[in-house]
Amino acid sequence: MQKIDSTGYVIQNIERADQKVIEGLAECGVSTVHEAQGRKGLLADYIRPIYPGARIAGSAVTILSPPCDNWMVHVAIEQLQPGDIMVLGTTNPSNAGYFGDLLATSAQARGCIGLVIDAGVRDIADLTKMGFPVWSKAIHAQGTVKETLGSVNVQIICANQLVYPGDIIIADDDGVCVVRRDEASQVLEKAEERNKNEAAKRERFASGELGLDIYGMRERLSKKGLKYVE
Amino acid sequence: MQKIDSTGYVIQNIERADQKVIEGLAECGVSTVHEAQGRKGLLADYIRPIYPGARIAGSAVTILSPPCDNWMVHVAIEQLQPGDIMVLGTTNPSNAGYFGDLLATSAQARGCIGLVIDAGVRDIADLTKMGFPVWSKAIHAQGTVKETLGSVNVQIICANQLVYPGDIIIADDDGVCVVRRDEASQVLEKAEERNKNEAAKRERFASGELGLDIYGMRERLSKKGLKYVE
Amino acid sequence: MQKIDSTGYVIQNIERADQKVIEGLAECGVSTVHEAQGRKGLLADYIRPIYPGARIAGSAVTILSPPCDNWMVHVAIEQLQPGDIMVLGTTNPSNAGYFGDLLATSAQARGCIGLVIDAGVRDIADLTKMGFPVWSKAIHAQGTVKETLGSVNVQIICANQLVYPGDIIIADDDGVCVVRRDEASQVLEKAEERNKNEAAKRERFASGELGLDIYGMRERLSKKGLKYVE
Amino acid sequence: MQKIDSTGYVIQNIERADQKVIEGLAECGVSTVHEAQGRKGLLADYIRPIYPGARIAGSAVTILSPPCDNWMVHVAIEQLQPGDIMVLGTTNPSNAGYFGDLLATSAQARGCIGLVIDAGVRDIADLTKMGFPVWSKAIHAQGTVKETLGSVNVQIICANQLVYPGDIIIADDDGVCVVRRDEASQVLEKAEERNKNEAAKRERFASGELGLDIYGMRERLSKKGLKYVE
Amino acid sequence: MQKIDSTGYVIQNIERADQKVIEGLAECGVSTVHEAQGRKGLLADYIRPIYPGARIAGSAVTILSPPCDNWMVHVAIEQLQPGDIMVLGTTNPSNAGYFGDLLATSAQARGCIGLVIDAGVRDIADLTKMGFPVWSKAIHAQGTVKETLGSVNVQIICANQLVYPGDIIIADDDGVCVVRRDEASQVLEKAEERNKNEAAKRERFASGELGLDIYGMRERLSKKGLKYVE
Amino acid sequence: MQKIDSTGYVIQNIERADQKVIEGLAECGVSTVHEAQGRKGLLADYIRPIYPGARIAGSAVTILSPPCDNWMVHVAIEQLQPGDIMVLGTTNPSNAGYFGDLLATSAQARGCIGLVIDAGVRDIADLTKMGFPVWSKAIHAQGTVKETLGSVNVQIICANQLVYPGDIIIADDDGVCVVRRDEASQVLEKAEERNKNEAAKRERFASGELGLDIYGMRERLSKKGLKYVE
C-alpha cells in the first residue's frame, strides 16, 4: 500500500483486487460487507446517493483535491481502468460542485462505474439519465477552479475513512464501505456466509418466529433484569 | 397512560385506539391532523421517510433504546399487534442502523405497518421493495450491539415529542404527528371538518378567487398598515 | 430596481424580463447559467427540490415574511402573472410550513409555475401530484400564523443571495440561481455558447479523449510540479 | 404531576422539592446527578451556558412558548418563587432572543436564579455582569413578538427532555439535568454516595494507581480477547 | 450606494457615516439597535466573537472573497481609514482561516478596529492579546491561497445580510447588526430613546413590579383566553 | 508505523519523537506548524478547546473506541509516558462524555498533558481547575459503558485526520494539528524559519507598510484585471 499522503503525485498502475471478489462484494451490499469485516470501513452517513437504486463495487482510484478545485479529477481519469470507482477527498472541506456530466462522460468512456466524493456534485438530472451513480456530501452547482495541485492514487481521508488506492469500494442505497485489498477474499467469504445465514433467518422471521427465540435471547434478557408488567 | 420512563421494563397489553379512528386519521394526513389538534404533536423535521408516497396511521408500540444497541427491537416485536407502528427513541443520540430487512420481515409478519425511529436505519433497498415504510433521522449501515437493556411500551421522547404507548401515530411525506388516545376522536372530527372546508376552498382557489377575499384579509392588512405602491 | 427592504409594502406592477430570454435560461439549467454569469447568483445548497426532475425559469415575485407567519403569501398571490416564480425570504430563520396545496392551487390558478422558499413547505404528496415544484430549506407540517406584516416585491435575502423583484430565477435538480434582469440577455448568450461548446466536448469525451489533452493541461500541470510515479 | 401540555393555561402554586435536597443536588453537579439517577434526564448537548463557572439547582417553572414569541415569559415571572429556575420549551423550533437583561432583572427581583431555554437569549454582556446564568440553544439578538398564548407550568419538552413543573433542574458547565420531584431524595442519596466513592478513587488515581487495577478490569478484558503486542 | 456585486473591483473613497452617530450606536449595542431599526439588519447567529467583552461600531469596508482565498484582504487594508471595520463575505461558503495576527497588525496600523467574517479566522490567542476583535463563522487554522480576484467595497452578502460599503456595523457579545448610512441618525435617535425607556423600566422591574402590569398585558391575555388554574 | 486498524489490540512501547522537536513545535503553534508542513494534518474545526489559553505538543497515544464506551481509555492510561497526549477516535460517531476529572487525575499522574477526542467530555469545571486541557467535539455529561473492546496505539481517524501512534500532536486555541514522526524535524525547521520571517513582517506591518508592497502583489493583481474605481 502506498504511504504517500502529499500533494503533487500521481501513482500509476496501482494494483486492483480480483474482479470476482469485487463482484461478490457488490452482490452482498454495504450493510452485509460492513458487518462481515467487523464493522469497520463505513463512510460517514452524510454521504448519500444522488438517485436511489444503484449498487456497485470496484477498485478505488483515489483523488486528493484542494477545496473548490477539481483539476485533479482530469488527471485521475487518465488512470482509470474498466470497473474502477473514483473516490475523492479534499485537503479542506468544500461543498463545491467538482463533478458534472462532462467529466462523467469522460470517466464512463474509460469504464469507470461511479464516484464517491466528500464534496459536491452537479448536473444531477444528466447523471441520472446517464446512469452514472454518485455518492456525495452535497448537490451544488458551484463551479470550481483549476489552480492548485492535489494527488491521484495516494492515501486519502474520505468522509472520516482512510482509503488506499486499490481498496474495494462498495456503494448502495445504505451508503459506502471500503475494504482493504488484502482482506477482500476473507471479507467476501464471511459476507456470503452471513447472507446464507440471513436467508434462512428471513424465512423463519417471515413465518412468525421471533428473534427472541431464534437467537435465544430470553434468558440473557432475564438475567440482565428485564421485567414484564401489565 | 403509563408513567414509566425507565429502562428494564416491558409493558404488555397496552390499550389501543379504535381502528376506525386510526383509519380516519390516516386519510387526513399529517398536516391536517397537526392543525386539527391545535398544532401540537409534530415530530422534528429531521425525521424523513426512506421512500416517498407512504401514508400510514397506527398505535404506537414504543421502544426506549440505548445508543447503538437494538436489543429492545427484538423484545418489542413480540408485543406487536396488527396495525401497530413501532416508535423508537434513544437514551442518548445515535445515528447507528438499528433496523434492517430481517427485523422488518419479523415485524411485518406480526402485522406491524411501519417504524418511526429517532436514529438510523439500513437495508433501504430491501425495505422499499417490501413496502415497509420507515421514518428516520439517518440512513446508516452502522451495526449495533445487544448489550444493554432499554424498555418497551414506556413513555419516550422521539424527535423532541413525548410519545406514550398506544398513542396514534400518523406518518406521511410531510413527517410524523402523534395524537393522544383520549383526544383521538375529537381530533378526527376536527380534521375531517377541516378537510371538507379545504375541499370547498380548493375549488374557489382553483377558479381564481384570492385568499385575500376568501378569508376577508384586506381590511386587517390595511389596519396593520400595509401600503400598496407602484 | 427597488431599494425597499422594509416590511409593510407591496410593490405593484414590477417589470419582468423578456419571456424568450427566460425560456432560454430554463433550457440551459442552473449549472450552466451560474457559470455563464461569472459564478454568482447561486442560492445556498440547503435549498432542495421537493421532487426530482423539475426545471423551471421565471420572474421573481419576492416575499419578505416574518418567522412562522405566511400572511404575505396571500398578498403576493394577487401580484402574480403567468410564468412568475414566488421567492420567499424570512426576516428571521424559520423551518415552519409556510406553503401547502391550497396556496399552490391559488398560485397555479394565476399562472405561477413554482416557489423558492428559505423556510419549510408541506403537503408534499399533493404538490407532487399537482406538478407544482418547490425548492425549500425544509419539509415541515408545522402551521404558521397570520399576524405580522412583511412585504411583497421588495429586495430580499433568500438562502444567502440577494433577490430583487423581477429577477430571473432558474431552478432545477442542481438548485437555484438568480440572474439580474438587465444582465439576462448577455447571460443567456454566454450560456448558450457554453452549451454548444459543451456539446462538442461531450462527443470528444465520449470517444475517449481526455480533458488533459482537450484542455491542454499537461504542460501547466508539469510546471506546477506534478510528478508521475509507479 | 400536571398532565396538561396545551397552550392557554397557567398552573399556579405548583409544588416544589425540599430546598435541602435541591442544594444537595447543586453541590453534586450535573454529571454526578445524571449518573446517580440511572443516566436519564440529560438535556441535549446543544444547550450551553452563556458564561463559564455557574452551577445552580432549583425548581422548574416551565414555560411553553410559540416560536419567536416571548409573551409567556412575562406571565411566568409572576409565578416565580425564590430559588426557582425558568425552563422554556417552544411549540416549534426558534433561535430568536426571547430573554434579555430587563426580563432577567424582573426574574431576579422575584428570587429566580437562572434560565434554561431551548431557544435564543440576548444581552449576554449584561446578564454576565448581573450574574444571571442562562443555558441556551443560541445567542441571538433577534426580537420576539407578544401575540400568541403559550402556557406556564404545564409539562414541556426542552432540548429532547420532558420537564414537569416542580422538577428539579441542575445546571453547570457540563450542561443541564432534570430530576423528578418524587425521585429527588433517592437520587441525592446515590449522588452523594457516588461523590464519596469518587473522592476515594481520586486519591488512588492521583497516587498513580490504574483504573485497570482499581476496578479489576484486567481479567474481563482478557476474556473479551484483548491482546497486548509490541 | 454602490450597486456593483461583481469580482475584480476596488471602490475607493467610499463615504462614511458621521463619527458621532457611529459612537452613539456603539454605546447602544446590537440588541437595542436591531430593535430600534425595526428588527432588520441582524447577521445570522452563527457569527460569534472570538473572545467575550468587545463592543464596537464602525464603517464597513466590504470584501468579497473567493472560497479559501484571502488575497482581497490585502487589497482591502489599503482602503481602510481609522475607525473602519472590515466585513468579509465569500462567493462560496468556506471555513478556512482567512485572517490571522499579521493581517490584524497591518489593519490595526491603519486604524481598523475589527473584522466581521463569514468564514474562518486563526491566531486566536494573538488576536486576543492584541485586542483585535473578530466575529466569525469558524475558528480554523486552515491556510488560504492568493489566486483569484474578488472585490473591495462592493455590496456583499455576509451571514445572510446585505452589506453596502459605508454601512455602519455594530458588533458585541450578542452578535452583529448592520445599519444603512442614510438611516443611521434616525436609528440612533430611536435607540437612545429606547435606552432611556429601558433604564426607567429596569428600575421598576428591579423593585419587583411585573411586566404584566408595567405593559398592561393582563386584559389582552385574558381576552386571548389565558386561564389561571391551580 | 503500525498498520493495525482493528479492535482488540494494545500496541506497547511505541516510539516517540525527540522531546526537543516536540517543544519546538509547541512554541510554533498550530497555524504555523500546519503551514510549515504544506497545509496538511489539520483536524476538523469542530474540535474545540474546553477552555482558552492552552498550547501543548506531545506524542500521540491513540485510542480507538466503540461509540458510548470508554473502556479503552483505562487501558490507554497504562501506556502513557510523561509528555504524551491521548488522541481518541471512535468506530462510530458519538457525543457521549468519555472522559472526566477522575480519568484526568489518573492520566495526569502518569504525566499525560492533554486529550484530543472526537467525542464528548465532561467535568469541565474540574478539568479547568486542574489545568488539564481537552480538545473535543462536544461537552456532554452523558455516561458511557465498558462493554466492547477497542484498541490502543493503532492507527485511528480523528476528526477527519489519520493519526498514527507516536505522531506529534500540537493543540492550541486555533485547533489541533498532527505531524508524522519522521517529518517532525523538517517541519520544525520550516516552522521556525516561518516564525522568524513573520516576526520581521510583523514589524513592517506594524509600521504601516502594506502587504500589497511587502509581498509585491500589485503587478499580479493588475494582470489579473483588478480595477480601481471611485
Image (cartoon, coloured by chain):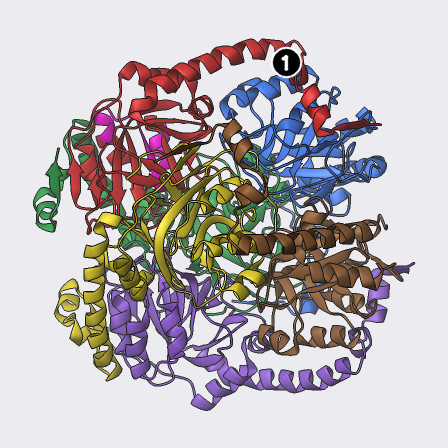
Chain colours: A red, B blue, C green, D brown, E purple, F yellow
Q: What residue type is labelled 1?
A: Ile
Name the spot of residue F127 as percent of width and height, x first: 53, 60
| Crowd around label 1: few <14 · some 14–19 · many ≥20 (10 Å) | few
Q: Which residue is drawn at 38% across and 45% down?
A: F160
For the C terminus of chain F, the quadrant is bottom left
Q: Can residue F46 be seen in this view?
A: no
Q: Is residue C52 visible?
A: yes
- A78 is within the stretch colored magenta: no
Name the spot of residue B133 as percent of width and height, x first: 60, 26
In magenta, the rendered stretch is A107-128
Using the rendered view, name the quadrant where residue B225 is placed.
bottom right
Q: How many marks?
A: 1
Residue occupied by mark 1: A214
The one of A20 and D94 positioned closer to us in this rendering: A20
For the N terminus of chain F, the quadrant is top left
The one of B185 and B155 positioned closer to us in this rendering: B155
